[in-house]
């Protein structure tokens, strides 16, 4: 039997047409609200949702994007590898230059399209790199047999000390 294919909206929802702001000139802005269901931002990042306000402000250098977005991610606990769903708040503030400038990562293309995907990907991966735990009491995996100590207990000898840390263990035992 075939497993169901996950349904995502197209990542085109992250490509914003800001041509009207480019034409309006500096000192104009536009406020918008994101409410996007599951979307594949990049090959290595799928979000369960994106919600929150965003402001696009035109200045003489391009479009300043500011927002506080709540994104849902499904990831693995860093200790026990169980899948968990978590909401991350991403504060974004980035200048997308216009016209396109060589060597600048974020820019508004000549067709007036601003792609938020690469910025969101970078900010979310930075947030995820700080570590995610399924809970404060997560016991992790047994270093001997690999059993998840949150779900089962193992009979491994856990007093085994890495030889590089043996002197530290002796200090702890003396106290």
Image: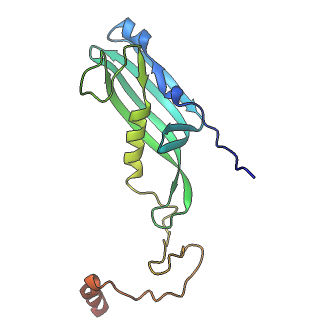
Residue 149 falls left or right of residue 159: right
Give percent across and percent down for residue 113: 43, 19
Q: Residue furthest front?
A: 1
Query: Which is nearer the eye, 103 or 131?
Result: 103
Residue 55 falls left or right of residue 64: right
Residue 93 falls left or right of residue 40: left
Q: Quadrant of residue 132?
A: bottom left
Residue at 44% across, 35% down: 68
Residue at 45% across, 27% down: 54
Query: Which is nearer the eye, 56 or 40?
Result: 40
Q: Is residue 89 above or below residue 104?
A: below
Q: Is residue 171 above or below residue 47?
A: below
Residue at 33% across, 12% down: 27
Give percent across and percent down for residue 145: 50, 80
Give percent across and percent down for residue 24: 38, 6
Residue at 38% across, 26% down: 65
Q: Is residue 33 above or below residue 98?
A: below
Query: Which is nearer the eye, 159 or 59?
Result: 159
Q: Residue furthest right?
A: 1
Q: How many marks?
A: 0
Quarter of the image where the C terminus is located: bottom left
Give percent across and percent down for residue 115: 42, 26
Looking at the picture, the colour scheme in use is rainbow
Q: Quadrant of residue 35?
A: top right
């Amino acid at each position: 039997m075939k497993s169901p294919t996950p349904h995502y909206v197209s990542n085109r929802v992250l490509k914003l047409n800001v041509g009207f702001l480019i034409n309006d000139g500096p000192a104009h802005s536009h406020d918008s609200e994101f409410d996007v269901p599951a979307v594949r931002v990049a090959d290595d990042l799928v979000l369960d949702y994106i919600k929150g306000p965003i402001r696009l402000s035109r200045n003489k250098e391009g479009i300043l994007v500011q927002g506080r977005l709540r994104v849902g991610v499904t990831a693995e606990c860093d200790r026990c590898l169980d899948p968990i769903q978590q909401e991350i708040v991403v504060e974004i503030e980035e200048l997308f230059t216009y016209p396109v400038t060589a060597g600048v990562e974020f820019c508004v293309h000549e067709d007036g399209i601003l792609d938020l995907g690469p910025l969101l990907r970078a900010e979310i991966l930075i947030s995820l790199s700080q570590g995610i735990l399924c809970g404060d009491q997560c016991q992790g995996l047994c270093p001997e047999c690999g059993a998840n100590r949150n779900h089962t207990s193992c009979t491994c000898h856990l007093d085994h000390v890495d030889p590089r840390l043996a002197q530290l263990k002796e200090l702890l035992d003396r106290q």
